[in-house]
Amino acid sequence: MKTPSALFSLLLLTQPHALSADGPVPPDYRFKVESLLEGMPQPMQMQFAPDGRLFFNEIAGVVKIFDPKDRSVKEVGKLEVTNAMENGLLGMALDPGFAENHWIYLLHSAPDFDGQTLSRFEVKDDKLDKDSRKDLLKIPEQRKECCHHAGALRFGPDGMLYISTGDNTNPFQSDGFSPLDERDGRNPWDAQKSAGNTNDLRGKILRIRPKADGSYEIPEGNLFRKGTPDTRPEIYAMGFRNPWRFSIDPADGALYVGDVGPDSGETREDRGPNGFDTLNRITKPGNYGWPYSRGKELYNDFDFTANKAGKAFDMKGPTNDSPNNTGMKKLPAVQSPLVWYPGRPTPDFPLIGGGGRTACGGPAFHYDPKFRQSGGFPEYYDRSIIFYDWQRPFIVWLRMDARGNLEKMEPFTNAVRLAQGADDDSGRFQIKRPVDMCFGKDGALYVMDYGETWGANKDARLVRISFQWGNLAPVAKIEANNTRGPEPLAVSLSAEGSKDYEGDTLAYEWRLQPGDKVIGKAKEAKVTLSTAGNYTAELTVKDTKGGTAKSSVNLVVGNHAPEVHIVAPADGTFVTPGQKLRYEIEVKDVEDGSSKDKPDEIGYRTLVNASWEAGDDASGVESGLALMKQNDCFNCHSVDQKLVGPPLLDIANRYRGKSEAIAPAAERVLKGSSGVWGEVGMLPHPQINPDEANLMVRWIFSLEPGKAAPAVNRGLTGELTVPNERRLRGGQLEASYTDAGKGTVGSLGSSASIRLLPRLLQAESGKVQGAKVLSGSGAQGQFIGSIDHGHRLDLGKLQLDDSVSLTARVSSGGQGGVIEFRDGSASGRLVAKLEVKSTGAWDKWEEVTAPLEVKGPVDLVAVFVNPGKGGIMNLDWVRFNEK
């Protein structure tokens, strides 16, 4: 994120009265995107309560409440669940009468029952009353093999509870086609037992009417009437593989069900279509085809004993003759999906591109004029549906005609960048894996972002996307050179980056403080400061409608900035968990002297900070830590040692798990406090805003002993311990020095930093040129693929003094090729050369090793070579081996 509060605002060109459904597309810069909450491990579903608070569940079994008013979080309760094979606390829904009865429904994977349990609880005083538990429905499953449980819960406008269930079938031994293995003992590999079974609750959308006594009724209008032989009356729609996310349009009750498809990347005449994910619009009971069809195409029957394909199934009514079927043999006719798409780009729906697939049915938007006051979306999107993908990822709008057919697909606002991986510095707000979303009563879109990887992520967060109406203030931006140094100081100022999104002409005014002297009324200004001191240049820009914006830059005259150099370790040094790491810092300052001449004085003002990244944390240095470093926090606090104030770990230990303590602690940061941790009080910090204080406190509360917390030391030399984390992803060593100023002239600070790296580098962590980062069978769920001749991977600066060879994890279902590791560029000196032969399949990985021909520092570039050949290999990681 570009700002500590994780707030990114984008504003608009056209007048708001023009934003009707027939008007122009609302410009991206009208959208405001902000992070409301961060650090929720594996969030699943969310729903607003009538009082405006947001309930959400985490797959580990926890239910929480987020209050948008003060951004506080409470844990409502925790259920004991198993998380093996994609199980857990899968779904959550609040009763339509929640304001009066306080009932919450949870779909959870109990450790002592092979399957899913739908339970109702009462929430009393914001706590889950375990004694109020009522088990409405149990859905038996097999737990010998994975996977596919779906598990979303939604109430429709008809008051019925809709439940999605997966086919509970192992997909990995069917070549990516339909799993129809009818051999003895192969029940977990046969989806005909579940999704194609009219007498089984798996692979379905269920529809029930919960009753006050904790039981349920079967409503009219399901797929099978109650009492129909060989059927379950709870079934509303059948034939799903993994309908993980669905939504219900509150206006007409239509369901939009995203169903995750199989992995085949090709259509075969003897087996059937390649894998499709689908979005299905459901307004009446029906069969949606799995495991007999996908997209709009049919599978062939397949004899796994003889390894022989049979005839294609019948779209008008497939026959389920599997010995694992306990239901009807002749099934209802197959319904067509609304959207269907494979892994590669498709001309049917070009807007959604190519990549991984996890289709999700998103919410419907219905415009209300009151949204103009609350930041809701404009009328242009009225009656449109959001369709999104958790893995690829994407978000698009669907426009439906009066008969419920797809009229067109439109892009979501470009204010949001949907992608995993590092920030691309575009200034757009990045969402990595949208896992659930809903429109609030304010008309804004709330998105739960799962984070970087498939596991628990520290960068998971709740995002609000709103729309800004009316005249928008301009943006004031200063570009300045020569802002600090000895007198006389000649400063050039420019407002070139300032702008008004609505196209208004801007007026400029520059003032110098202290003295409030006007130094210019044009876009450019110059000033020469002959007297030592601290100054501020202020810019005010004003549009023709009276909207104003201000910006300022500090000018320090009479002091030189210090120079900081990290002598050791070198940039790109490899580290191992538990290792002791010595460091040495060198500082030079014109006014203060040098570290060589004044080691004690200079050393006291030198701060050394090691920040680490480990486990599934893909967020790098957290924004809370960045704010701590920007302010004076580490002058008084160390992570694990007492300085002026208590160790930050002591604070974390006192408040761990007490989310209600975050708001008062943030208030103490802003206003100061005394008596909380002894006699020495904490000074107020008026320069910090409430959102920033909240992030800082959350970061402190997240610290745990022995984990990959930052190490903060003072001094020019010392020793750090690398965290003993098995999945260490490396870190950063930063040294900073703030000088003592010169007389009344303010202090100046400088810093230097280096990267510390694990010996095993994930390929996707480098700068990929030409190839693509793909999700799948890589060691961390990702790898780089679609590699052609001439593609490159920049791994950055590395120190190779103590390495003798490198090993790469590769695969190739094609011709293979050579990886040339070079220094500095694609034509630089050769560091190592790996020959990669075909491994027989794109998902069959092998390790290959080559000696290093170079020692010392390198700027490593991997060049992929096989002239004239396309799709030569995949690369998962590169490891640098010690002597």
Image (cartoon, rainbow, N blue to C red):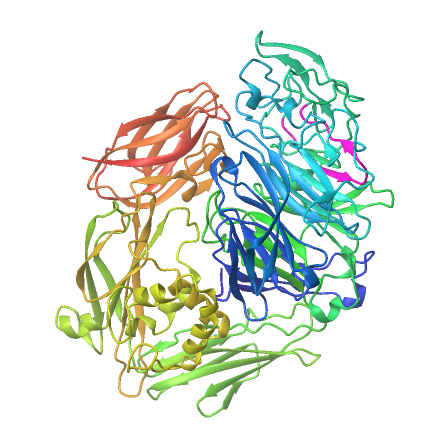
Find the residue positioned furthest to the bottom: 515
Relative to 326, say whether 716 is above or below. below
| Magenta-span inclusion, residue 2 | no
Residue shown at 46% from the left, 20% from the top:
815
| Magenta-span inclusion, residue 277 | yes
Give coordinates of residue 221: x percent, y percent: 82, 38
Find the residue positioned furthest to the left: 597
Q: Does residue 706 show up?
A: yes
Query: Number of callouts in the render?
Result: 0
Give coordinates of residue 273: x percent, y percent: 66, 22
The answer to whether residue 93 is left or right of residue 575 is: right
Quadrant of the snapshot with the C terminus: top left
Q: Does residue 561 show up?
A: no
Q: Which residues are magenta?
A: 275-291
Q: Nearer the viewer, residue 830 or 501?
A: 501
Give coordinates of residue 345: x percent, y percent: 63, 34
Find the residue positioned furthest to the top: 306
Find the residue positioned furthest to the right: 402
The quarter of the picture where residue 641 lies is bottom left
Relative to 742, say whether 613 is above or below. above
Residue shown at 18% from the left, 65% from the top:
716
Give coordinates of residue 633: x percent, y percent: 34, 72
